[in-house]
Structure formats: structure tokens, C-alpha cells
Image (tube, grey):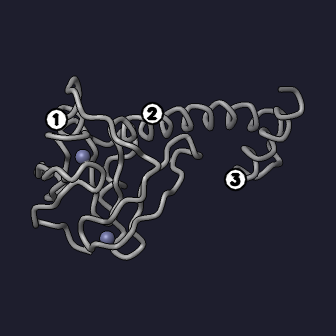
Amino acid sequence: MADTTDIIKCPACDKVMKKLYIQEDDLHIDICLDGCGGIFFDNRELEKFDEKHENADKILEAIEGKKFVQVNDVELRICPACGLPMVKMGAADGTVQIDVCNTCGGKFLDNGELQKIRKYKNDHQKVDNIIDGIMKTVYSDIKPNKRRMFFEKLVSKYV
Ligand SMILES: [Zn+2]
Ligand SMILES: [Zn+2]
């Protein structure tokens, strides 16, 4: 679905969300600046900001250091773009629960979740690189996509 240009209300605290225009990608991100600090991403927008190397400065600058109201993040949320219930989905291997709309693909992140996802992806990459290095020298016959699995099995025996 296309970028929403309509003014929407926060699915967590019902405050009117603020549009943040990201020039680089020519899209608008909705942020709950007057309420809970949650962020609504239209379909596929999150993918542009969820990795450490991707530029999310504008979003992070807008929310960092601000006080936001606490919200209950286990509560059912209604998609602000299409009015239907969203489903909880684990991100960053379940360390974060985000709300996803199966109809429009919109995603709502509570305050702090974007940072966690970005950090997690970065850590993951580091671990992958280390594992790759070990595997290349020790188990060069194992295919790259199997290496992580193999390594995790190995480690789980000892921890
Ligand atoms: Zn809110
Ligand atoms: Zn929706």
C-alpha cells in the first residue's frame, strides 16, 4: 500500500501522530510525538530503517531524549490506516513484539523498539561474521547458510 498522507491517530494512545518527511526516501513516517513515542510504518517502510547501516537519524532525532507516556503493549491495536485489528509479531528473534496489519502491511513499533531492532540486526551481523571466520577455517565444507545452525547446535551443548 502507498504511503499514507492522511493524518492518523496513534493505535496505542489515540493521540494525533506527527508526520515526519524523509526526503531521501520520499516518504512519511508517522510518529506519536505528543503521546507514547510509537512509530507507524506503512507497508515496507520499516525495511528501510531497521538495519544499523540504514539512515534512521531523522526518526531517532525526533524521539530521542523525549519523555513519552507509558502504554500497554500487550493490548490489541487497531491499524490506523485501515481500521482493522493488528497482530503481534516477534521481531529481532522475539526480543521485540511489534504490531502488524495483515491487510495493509503497516507496522507499529512502541517507543524504543526500533532502536532494539536496529541494534539486534547489527549484533547479529557481527556474530555471523565471527562464525563465518571460524567456519571458513575449520569447517569449510559446510555451506554458509548451514553454518549458523551448526554452530548454534554446537554451542547449545555447552551453555
Ligand atoms: Zn501513541
Ligand atoms: Zn492496515
Which residue lies at the image location 18% right of the left edge and 31% below the top edge? 61
Which residue lies at the image location 62% right of the left edge and 38% below the top edge? 128
Residue farthest toward the top in the current orientation of the protein: 65
* Quadrant in the rendering for residue 137: top right
Residue where numbered disc 2 is placed? 119
Residue where numbered disc 3 is placed? 145
Which residue lies at the image location 74% right of the left edge and 31% below the top edge? 134
* Quadrant in the rendering for residue 32: top left
Compared to residue 67, the image places residue 12 above or below, namely below
Which residue lies at the image location 24% right of the left edge and 32% below the top edge? 68
Which numbered circle lies on residue 92? Answer: none
Sequence-earlier tag: 3 or 2: 2
| Pointers 1 and 3 in contact (C-beta within 8 Å) | no
- Secondary structure of the residue carrying tag 2 is helix
Question: What is the number of callouts on the image?
Answer: 3
- Mark 1: which amino acid? Ala
Inter-mark Cα distance, 3 to 2: 22 Å
Position in image of residue 60 (x %, y %):
24, 34
Position in image of residue 150 (x %, y %):
81, 44
Q: Is residue 92 left or right of residue 105?
A: right
- Secondary structure of the residue carrying tag 3 is helix
Residue where numbered disc 1 is placed? 62
Neighbours of disc 1 within 10 Å: few (<14), some (14-19), many (20+): few
Neighbours of disc 3 within 10 Å: few (<14), some (14-19), many (20+): few
- Mark 2: which amino acid? Lys
In front: mark 3 or mark 2? 2
- Mark 3: which amino acid? Asn
